[in-house]
Image: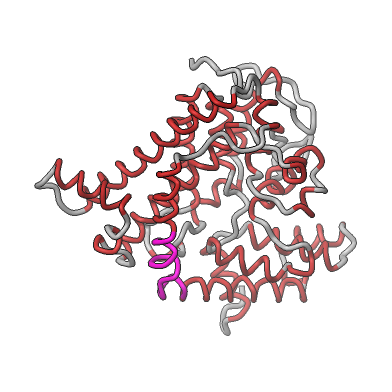
Amino acid sequence: MTTLAPYAVREATSRGRAHHEDAPAYRGAFQRDRDRIIHSAAFRRLEYKTQVFVNHEGDMFRTRLTHSIEVAQISRTIARALGLNEDLVEAIALAHDLGHTPFGHAGQDALNACMRDCGGFEHNLQSLRVVDMLEERYASFPGLNLTYETREGILKHCSRKNARALGALGERFLNGGQPSLEAQVANLADEIAYNNHDVDDGLRAGLLDIETLTSTAFFREQYESVRERWADLSGRRVIHETIRAMINRQATDLLDASRAAIDAAGPGSVDDVRSHCTSLIGFSTEMLEQHRALKRLLLRNLYRHYRVFRMSMKAQRIVGDLFGVFFETPRSLPHDVQRRIEERGGGEPERARLVADYIAGMTDRFAIAEHRRLFTVGELT
């Protein structure tokens, strides 16, 4: 078992759970968090939620589920090398996308627009809402009753307005503090995973090509190194080796730069980490610029590609249409959602939030089917 560094999160000093539970007999507290996340309905639904491409576009593209597993793998590797708590970083990585809407960022933008007058929609805050309230599995409490440290890591971003309502969990967004190093690792592992794997999916879909990608030094260096080492290698194996090299180089740089930052800051505890003025987990200056250059290329050539734009436009229309009909006609909602609206008094902000919960929990294909049932003549059930 890895020896924890002084600045790692320890179960013995955890800030605990909102609802008291006896300690598990054969697991640690963060293992219990991870297991509850894996067994949740929201986690299962990630299999049919989009990473970039709509779920029915093809079976080989990333989904939120495969992405979350990849983030967890990268996170655990980095955490072990830094002497951090692997169980905690894995739980954070597996839970970080639980609040994502169907259709990726297009669905999130559409739902945020629908909720403009009722508090807006933030997918990180929705992930927290899922684990705190929306999962219905246990007799003694709502949600999954996760530890403070896992919940802290899930909440990567939060508006100041919403942070004020979160008590201790929102303080760092108001006072400039930092989350645990485990949370910081999961955040950067998320970026490493989605940037490099969007390259793979973009090539697979024919929306990116090698010529375009080699315009960035980072991809070009790894690609040329692979071609030089394996001159006879062809097809998908070249791409896989190149992306493997990209992930390895970024993870290695992150480890080296983070070790240097931690050594310079000298934190003796997780409280020292939280009170530090900046994040201690990060890339070197050179790698950060290469990372940003790759993101800019993906924005220009993949995320703004006309085919992706068309998918996004259709997705936003589906989400907007669903929200409109459910908000205006609550009787069109399932009985359990109607019941929750009635229990909350039926006011517009409460109704809007519960409609948003229902839509955010949909998979891509269920949202498409719901839209067809509601708006296509001949689809009555």
Is residue 123 located in the magenta-colored stretch of the structure?
no
**Quarter of the rendering containing residue 256:** top left
Q: Picture quarter containing residue 226? A: top left
Farthest-out residue, bottom: 377
Please provide percent x and percent y for residue 207: 33, 67
Please give the name of the residue rendered at 77% of the width and 75% of the height, measured from the top-left corner.
329
Residue 300 shows in the view? yes
Q: Residue at x 15, y 51 (%)?
A: 234
Residue sitting nearer the eye, 330 or 159: 159
Where residue 164 sits in the image (x, y, percent)?
82, 48
Give the side of residue 46 with respect to residue 329, left or right.
left
Please tell me in which quadrant of the rendered image residue 324 appears.
bottom right
Nearer to me, 340 or 210: 210
Q: Is residue 376 left or right of residue 136?
A: left
Q: Along the horizontal axis of the image, is 327 left or right of 33? A: right
User: Which color mode does the image show?
Assistant: secondary structure
Single out the residue that lies furthest toward the left: 232
Dominant SS type (magenta): helix
Residue plotted at (55% across, 18% down): 4
| Magenta stretch bounds | 296-309
Quadrant showing the C terminus: bottom right
Q: Position of residue 176 (x, y in %)?
A: 72, 42
- Residue nearest the observer in this picture, 342 or 320: 320
138 vs 158, nearest the viewer: 158
Q: Is residue 337 left or right of residue 189?
A: right
